[in-house]
Structure formats: structure tokens, C-alpha cells
Amino acid sequence: MIATAHLWQPFHEFVFMRRALLGGLLLACSTAPLGVFLILRRMSLIGDAVAHGILPGAALGFWFAGLSLPALTIGGLGAGLSMAGLAAWITRRTGLREDASLAAIYPISLAGGVLILGIAGKRLDLLHLLFGSALAVDGPTLTGMLWVSGLSLIAMTLIYKPLLLDTLDPLFLQTVSRLGPLAHGVFLTLVVLNLVIGFQAIGALMVVGLMMLPAAAARFWSRRLPVLIVVAALLGSLSVWMGLLISFYYSLPSGPAIVLVAGGGYLLSVVFGPVHGLLRRPPLLTSQ
Amino acid sequence: MIGCQALRWGAPGQPLTPALDFELSKGSLTAIIGANGSGKSSLLKVIAGLQKPLAGKVRLSVPIKGGVSFLPQQQHLDRQFPISLQALVAAGFWGNKQSPEIRSQRLKTVLENWCLNGLEDRPLMALSGGELQRALLARLSLTDAPVLLLDEPHAALDELGQVLLWKHIHDWHLEGRTLVIVCHDLAAVREHIPCTLLIKSSGCAFGPSTELIRQLPQAQVA
């Protein structure tokens, strides 16, 4: 009984822990389908690139308005979207791969951000931006996260079918519908939006971990897309919960604790997962 | 139905053939033949509106979205994609306004027609090349498009699959659909397809299959 009490007691006792948990769970649920689709679209590393690219916008926002949520959000959103947009535009015009364009643009963006922080000369901790602190989620940030995750879940439901076909067989989708590029655009926007709202809670780089690790782990548990998304959301939520507890009881930074728990889940899935896992029995493909 | 005027296609700055003009009437059945790299698949994509021509025009008398169905080569597909065969085939219902009952009945019939019963729940990874090809053809069967563009539909199909394929092609032809088929099997083209478009970098030729293919004994060996 005492052991189970430890699992929820901190959240019962402290408002900041409750906020961190709620925010983290929201983020885990809304990033799960995004992470799964990023992997299926072979864009696994793009979250990372965008997370870095957000920095100059956030830095500019900080320069002009200090540590204010709207300023950081608008700045990050502007930088992230213009970076993703520029990469998509270069890709469409030149026919080169999107990951190459993004990989070329995000160092520019990141270096620009660090430079702006240097010029601003104020003490915005770069580490705080990149790695964040879940325990600093305040009321307005939580409200923002609620809106973002609600919006992204609704939007993902709406674009699910065209996005699925655009990922699996873009040529087929192009012959039956014009929705492919729109679905792609909405999807990238959602990725940026989630990263921006997430970086204020658990840090730009850590939110990428929360997005990709459960999604990568889920592939070891199912071959069905809806199941993959649910498994990813559950794994992400579990990581948030356990990570926050670990960070609470052992006084560790919360972002890395969450991501390391998710990482542990990923490694366990690699070994024990029934689908591609290392220990799986020889695949029996029953067609009944 | 499908008209091409002074059409040139290929990589930018490197058109594959001299400007091409041809006109395919409604309900026609045409093969596209030619060597590897001559631009058969690209031409099909240009007609389907999936690739921009370098010059010239393609005119279609049907709406480009929904009026044309395109069978891509299957290496475009990610075999690890977590989706079942049935879900892949059912994507052919895109834009379809029929009731769910009619759709599920049609899906069942089409799966039977392509000998895919029993494989409905298999993931793509667990399908053989021929099974996947039949699944793509089954999806195409559900689209109801008046123009069908098939890129190497016989690829990976065994003998039974080929028989099924030609039977369907004849049925579609009888229904009055317009078919364009990229095909390497010249003997089969001669037997089943009345008109042929031969793509060559020195110039294209269009005519009855029996005449065009008789002139190319060496190609038949290859």
C-alpha cells in the first residue's frame, strides 16, 4: 500500500507536480501519432532538426518580451514554421530530399539563435531552453498545452486518412485527391506546434525524445497503425509519470528523467517486443 | 480521350524522345513498349498528371482527380508499413459515395476476384510480391475510373495471376474504359492488346500491335 501511495502522493500533495504530470500526459498523447507518422514517413530526425530551429525565434521573443509565454510561443512557432516551410520549398523546387534541406537549414537557425542570445546579453539559460524543466509548468503554459494537444488530436483525426495514403502510396493519392500536400503541411505544422509548446515544459530536445522514443518503441509491439498510435501514447504517458516520480524522489532534472524512462522502454521493446524484437519466436504468419 | 501534343518528357534538359503526338480514343486499349530507360513509366506518370512534361500538352477528357487510376510499380511501397491487405485494397474507395453495405460487398467480391481471400488481415510485410501486386490491382478495380494507367501490371505475377490480370483487362476494355499498359511481355502484347506505342530515343511509333511487334524480332528475344 505504501509503495502504491508513493506513485501518486507527490501529485496529490504539490500543485506543480500535478501541473507537470497533466502537461506531460497531454504532450505524450498529442505527440504519439505525430511521432508514429514521422517514423513511417522516414522523417524520424526531422523533429530534432525543427527543435533546434525553434531557438532563434524563442530567443528573439525573449529579447523583446522577456520570459513570457506568448512571446516565446509566437517566436518559436515563427522560426519553426518558416524553417520547415523553407525546407519544404527548397525540396519542392530542387527535388532533393527533405531531410537534407532541413539538415542544412537547422544549423543556420540554431547558430542564429545562439548568436541572438549572445547579442541580447541577458541571462536566458540556453540549457533551460534546450532541456527545460517540467516542474516549471505554470497555469498559462498548461492551458496552452491543453489547447495544442486538443487541436492536434482533432487535426490528426481529420487528416488521418489522406496522411496515411500520402505516406504509404503518394502516387496513388495524387491520382485520386489533391489533399496530399495539404495533409503534409498540416502535419508539419502540428509537429512544430507541439515542439514549441513542449519546449517550454520539458525543453526543446527532450520533447523530441518524448515524441520519437515511444513511437519507435511501439513498432515492436504491433503491426497495426491505430494500435501503434495507442501503444505510443501509453508508453509516453507512462514515461512522463515514472520520470516525474524519479525526478521528484531523487531530485533529478525532470526532462531528462522522462526521456530516459522512455529510452528504457524503447530498449526493453527492442529486446522483448513481439513484432521485431530480438527475443521473439520465429514469426508464425498464420493466415488462419 | 487522351491526347498528347508535341509532348516531351524526361529529366530537365534531357527529353527522352523527339516531340510526341498521339491521340487515344475512348475505350481504347494501348500498350507502351520500349527498352529499359526509354521513358515508358515516366510517360505514364506524365499522362496521369504525376510528373510535369518538359514541353507540350496532355489533354484528358476526364477530370484528372478521380478520372484516372494509376497502378504504380510496387517498389514505391514501404513493405514495413503497418497496414493490412484489406485496408490497402479498401483505399480504392477514396471519394466513393456508396453505402457501407454495398462497399463491403464490393470489397469482398473484388478480393475474391483477385484470389485474395484469406489474406485480408495479413500485414504488407507478410505478402509475397505477387500477392501485393494482386492487392494493388484489386484496389485499382475499386476506383471506377474511366481511364486506367497500368505500369507493368504483370510484374511478380505467377501464371495464374497473369491469367487473372488479362481477364480483368479484357473485362475493363469491354466496359468501355480506356487502358494504357506499360508491358515488357511482347508476346502477350501482341496477343491481347490491339494498339501499341513504341518509345525509342530516335523516335516513337504508334500502330497496331501485330505490325509494330513483328518488326522487332530482336526485341522479342530480349
Image: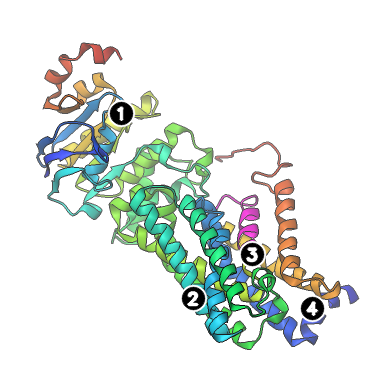
Tell me if I can see residue A55 in this picture.
Answer: no
Q: Please tell me whether residue A152 belongs to the stretch shown in magenta.
A: no
Circle 1: element type: loop
At horizontal 15% and vertical 14% (from top left) the residue drawn is: B215
User: Dot 1 surroundings within 10 Å: few (below 14), some, or many (20 or more)?
Assistant: few
Circles 4 and 3 on the same subunit: yes
- Mark pair 4, 1: CA separation: 65 Å
On residue A151, the disc is 2
Percent coordinates x, y for residue B4 in the rendering: 12, 41
At horizontal 73% and vertical 79% (from top left) the residue drawn is: A135
For the residues bearing labels 1 and 2, Cβ distance under 8 angstroms: no
What kind of secondary structure does the magenta stretch mostly adopt?
helix
As drawn, B106 above or below A2: above
Q: Which residue is mark 4?
A: A8
Image depth: mark 1 or mark 2 in front: 1
Label 3 resides on the chain identified as A
Counting residues from the N terminus, which is met first, the one under dot 2 or under dot 3? Answer: 2
